Amino acid sequence: MIKKTVCKENFGKRLSQLMEEHNETTYSMAERFSLSSPTISRYMTGQMAAKVTTIQLMAEYFHVNPIWLMGFDVPKYEKIESASEQNNQSEPIILSYYNQLNTLGQEIATEHVRLLTLDKKYTEKSVREYPSLVRDPDADYLTVKAAHSRTDIEIPEGVDTSDDDIMNDPNF
């Protein structure tokens, strides 16, 4: 077996690229991986190589191929092999958005996702798939439908049926 060593210069460039993409700083990375900020800076400038275990942790955090992060000419993202992983191809994208949020934003995003899991229309597979908001901003389910007259009750003649009256009267 050929032992692969870290190409410090490529590792530094790729680490810098990933940090920029995910709005990470030397300080946030140092805290996340229990390293010093100057150590992260040395990695980024190619002055020092990270340990393989640190590279593996960073690759997992950024969802990239650790061999690519080490500086080798391989695909940035590893091929997804299992069927369950194929269903989660958007996970790295979602995580990259999540990682751009500050602590408050992450807490709110987490709560929104938790609330979505309580609604069957977002968790049951039998429900029709909604088109992506990005691909189809004019999708039918985004259209606000106007209120219409009630047909299940009899409205007396001469009653004002303007929006405010209808909204404030429990009989309508």
Image (tube, rainbow, N blue to C red):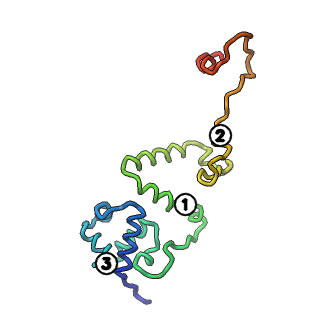
Cα distance in 3D space between marks 1 and 2: 26 Å
Question: Is residue 47 rendered to the left or right of residue 80?
Answer: left
Relative to the observer, which residue lies in front, 114 or 157? Answer: 157
What's under tag 1, amino acid-wise?
A: Ser
Residue 108 on image: x %, y %: 43, 45
What's under tag 3, amino acid-wise?
A: Gly
Residue 46 on image: x %, y %: 31, 78
Which quadrant is home to the C terminus? Answer: top right
Q: Is residue 2 above or below residue 172?
A: below
Label 3, on which residue? 46
Residue 80: quadrant of the picture = bottom right
Q: Is the residue under label 3 in contact with that under label 1 (CB below 8 Å)?
A: no
What's under tag 2, amino acid-wise?
A: Thr
Question: Is residue 104 rendered to the left or right of residue 113?
Answer: left
Question: Is residue 69 rendered to the left or right of residue 48?
Answer: right
Label 1, on which residue? 90
Q: Is residue 168 above or below residue 120?
A: above
Crowding near the residue tagged with mark 3, few <14, some 14–19, many ≥20 C-alpha atoms within 10 Å: some
Residue 153: quadrant of the picture = top right
Residue 165 on image: x %, y %: 62, 17
Label 2, on which residue? 143
Earlier along the polypeptide chain: callout 3 or callout 2?
A: 3
Crowding near the residue tagged with mark 2, few <14, some 14–19, many ≥20 C-alpha atoms within 10 Å: few
Question: Is residue 153 rendered to the left or right of residue 169?
Answer: right
